Amino acid sequence: MGTIVVILLMIGATIYWILQIACLMRMSDGDFCGRFDKPLWVAILLFSFVFGALAFSIWKSSVIADERVKAVTNRIGAMIQEGQKPDAPQ
């Protein structure tokens, strides 16, 4: 029973790792801050397996959150310049 659970966990971790590598490969070079960020993430994912995938997932989430904050800030700034009162968040 214990070996089946370990095998299932390894299969799940491998699928998660493959999905994160696929997500990394779909991203353009412009999505990264530095010149060699994408190759570094590839190396991290290849050599550290699940830990690298978790680190990439956390980094990706923070980048997405930063982009959302910038978009909201720009929208509020544009509304203030137009003389509109920004609505309260829902």
Image: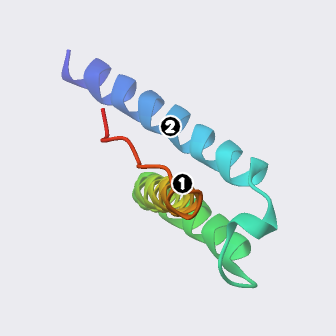
Tell me the residue that label 1 is attached to.
Answer: 79
Task: Work out whether mark 1 precedes mark 2 in sequence or the reverse, and give the earlier one.
Answer: 2
- In the rendered structure, the answer to whether residue 27 lies left or right of residue 81 reads right
Near-viewer residue (64 or 18): 64
Residue at figure coordinates x 74%, y 54% from the top left: 27
- In the displayed image of the protein, which residue is found farthest to the top? 1
Quadrant of residue 45 in the image? bottom right
Q: Is residue 59 visible?
A: yes
Near-viewer residue (39 or 78): 78
Q: Nearer the viewer, mark 1 or mark 2?
A: 1
Tell me the residue that label 2 is attached to.
Answer: 16
Residue at figure coordinates x 75%, y 52% from the top left: 25
Image quarter of the C terminus: top left
Category of crowding for the residue at label 1, using alpha-carbon neighbours closer than 10 angstroms: few (below 14), some (14–19), many (at least 20): some
- In the rendered structure, the answer to whether residue 16 lies left or right of residue 21 reads left
- Amino acid type at circle 1 is Met
Above or below, 17 relative to 64: above
